[in-house]
Image (cartoon, rainbow, N blue to C red):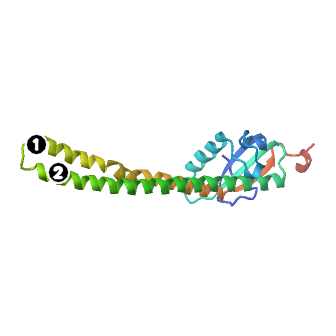
Amino acid sequence: MTRVQDGHPPDAHVLDLHLGELKSVFHALDPAPFRERDLDPRAHEYIVEWAREAPAGMPLGLSVRVDLGGSREEAAVLRQAIDEYFHACATSERRQLRQLLRRGRLSLVIGLGFVTVANVIAEFAAGTRFGIIRDSVVIGAWVALWRPIEIFLYDWWPMRATARLYDRIATMTVSIRPAREDPASHGGP
């Protein structure tokens, strides 16, 4: 990680990548054009882990140095590809979150129904010698609420955070430059 300007905001947290070829950042088995292609799983994981560690609220930037290529057109294609890819990841994560919450609501209705039936059975068995059965039914009823409680207290917020992270990555600035600068451009031999 270095701080490079290359069109990034001055306060941006910039990831500096060095690639042999620009195509190495894309998934090799995806036949789609570059701007519609998936990122290589290792590139995805690397970018996401780097962004997780970036300070919150600070804009992100990606500076790519490539041995072969590095034109403005390639930068535009990479920018669009990253934008589309991570927006798709955020959309997918939000879809999974909606499904999880739907499952949580259904599980809660089923669990509350079971608690109600269990309490009726427990009341019926209260005056009899079936105390162990009554206690087992009550314990089972509360266990039936375990999963909905887990969903609503713990499972949803990491998914929401991941979707927000993907949105943040999708909006980062991207620049490409050749790995080796032309010596003539620096006045050198």
Task: Specify whether 175 is left or right of 128.
Answer: right
Residue 58's place in the image compared with 188, above or below, is below
Task: Specify whether 163 is left or right of 112.
Answer: right
Query: Which quarter of the figure is the C terminus placed in?
Result: top right
Near-viewer residue (73 or 141): 141
Picture disc at residue 130:
1
Task: Specify whether 20 is left or right of 91.
Answer: right
Q: Earlier in the sequence, mark 1 or mark 2?
A: 2
Residue at (40% x, 54% y) in the render: 104
Distance of label 1 from label 2 (alpha carbons)? 11 Å
Question: How many neighbours does mark 2 have within 10 angstroms: few (below 14), some (14-19), or many (20 or more)?
Answer: some
Residue at (20% x, 48% y) in the render: 138
User: Would residue 12 be seen by someone viewing this image from the given angle?
Assistant: no
| Mark 1 secondary-structure assignment | loop
User: Would residue 182 be seen by someone viewing this image from the given angle?
Assistant: yes
Which percent across, then down, holds residue 175? 75, 53
Picture disc at residue 121:
2
Which percent across, then down, holds residue 35? 75, 52
Name the quadrant containing residue 95. Answer: bottom right
| Mark 2 secondary-structure assignment | helix
The amino acid sitting under disc 1 is Phe
Residue at (92% x, 47% y) in the render: 184
Which percent across, then down, holds residue 148? 36, 52
Which percent across, then down, holds residue 28? 73, 39
The amino acid sitting under disc 2 is Ile
Near-viewer residue (2 or 110): 110
